[in-house]
């Protein structure tokens, strides 16, 4: 089944404790992206990747890192999480890296930073 | 700056009634436009998209949207709403020359039986 998976689905952590949210897709998509969703703000793009080793900032990249070493994986790294990063995070992918193409979204990761 | 505005935060309609969700964008170039739906506790699913050609586009689940360049709008419509359409709807723009997306703040639809 074609899908985007995220792990973990739920995470509660404390300020400053490094964490990684994984994202994996099995559709051989070139384009992957991370978003955060906050009430009243909709979805905001954090980072995106057009292909392996090619990433760029979205609208809200501060406090986040990403890497794209393999085509299927696009982890989101919070080196020192803070409470304002408490949010619902979505990973998405599309092919063939065409911005007019359909983005497929993962189920989301709900992160709470205490 | 580029932006997407969904002026209605909440909309309530009766089952069987028609629906129109508004979306306005601010962008200098020809936009690529999308409507997504998010059911409770789920990720987002694409309903329809516009990037060229016929300004009236058909999507899944009986939805359609019309691109009006003069009004910078891309409103979503459905002639008869079903209870299963209750969800949150997001309009989005993809910026040409980049792979950046801008989403609106969403419209939450409630359907009365």
Image (cartoon, rainbow, N blue to C red):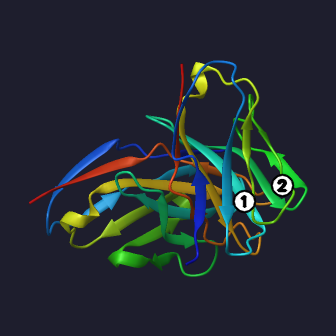
Distance Cα–Cα, label 1 vs label 2: 9 Å
Taking the image as shown, residue B67 lies to the left or right of residue B98, namely left
Q: Number of callouts in the render?
A: 2
Residues at marks 1 and 2 touching, judged by CB atoms closer than 8 Å: yes
- Residue at 51% over, 47% down: A9
Q: Mark 1 points at which residue?
A: A32
Above or below B43: residue A113: above
Rendered residue at 58%/76% (across/down): A2
At mark 2, the secondary structure is: loop
Quadrant including the N terminus of chain B: top right
Q: Residue A40, how many percent across, how many down?
A: 44, 34
Considering the numbered disc 1 on the image, is that residue within a helix, a strand or a loop?
Answer: strand
Q: Is B49 located above or below residue A44 in the figure? A: below
**Residues behind callouts 1 and 2 on a single chain:** yes
Q: Residue at x 56, y 50 (%)?
A: B25
Percent across and percent down for residue B45 are 48, 65
Give B111 or A65, whichever is nearer the viewer: A65
**Which of the pair A75/B37 is nearer the observer?**
A75
Task: State whether residue B3 appears in this view.
Answer: yes
Does residue B27 appear left or right of residue B96 in this picture?
left
Q: Which of B15 and A29 is in front in this view?
A: A29
Vertical relation: B88 (above or below) A39: below
Q: How crowded is mark 1: few (under 14 residues within 10 Å), some or many (20 or more)?
A: many
Q: Residue furthest right?
A: A53
Q: In which quarter of the image is the C terminus of chain B?
A: bottom left
Q: Residue A68 carries which label?
A: 2
Residue at 30%, 70% (x, y): give it: B78
């Amino acid at each position: 089944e074609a899908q985007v998976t995220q792990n973990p689905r739920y995470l509660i952590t404390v300020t400053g404790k490094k964490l990684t949210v994984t994202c994996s897709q099995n559709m051989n998509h070139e384009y992957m992206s991370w978003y955060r969703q906050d009430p009243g703000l909709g979805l905001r793009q954090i980072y995106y990747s057009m292909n392996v080793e090619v990433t760029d900032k979205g609208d809200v990249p501060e406090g986040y890192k990403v890497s794209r070493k393999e085509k299927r994986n696009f982890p989101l790294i919070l080196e020192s999480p803070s409470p304002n990063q408490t949010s619902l995070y979505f990973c998405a992918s599309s092919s063939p890296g065409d911005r007019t193409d359909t983005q497929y979204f993962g189920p989301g990761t709900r992160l709470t930073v205490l | 700056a580029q932006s997407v505005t969904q002026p209605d935060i909440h909309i309530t309609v009766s089952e069987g009634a028609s629906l129109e969700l508004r979306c306005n964008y601010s962008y200098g170039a020809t936009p690529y436009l999308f409507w997504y739906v998010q059911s409770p506790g789920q990720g987002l699913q694409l309903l329809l998209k516009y990037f060229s050609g016929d300004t009236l586009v058909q999507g899944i689940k009986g939805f359609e949207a019309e691109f009006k360049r003069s009004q910078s709008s891309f409103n979503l419509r459905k002639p008869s709403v079903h209870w299963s359409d209750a969800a949150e709807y997001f309009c989005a723009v993809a910026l040409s020359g980049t792979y950046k997306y801008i989403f609106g703040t969403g419209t939450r639809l409630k359907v009365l039986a």
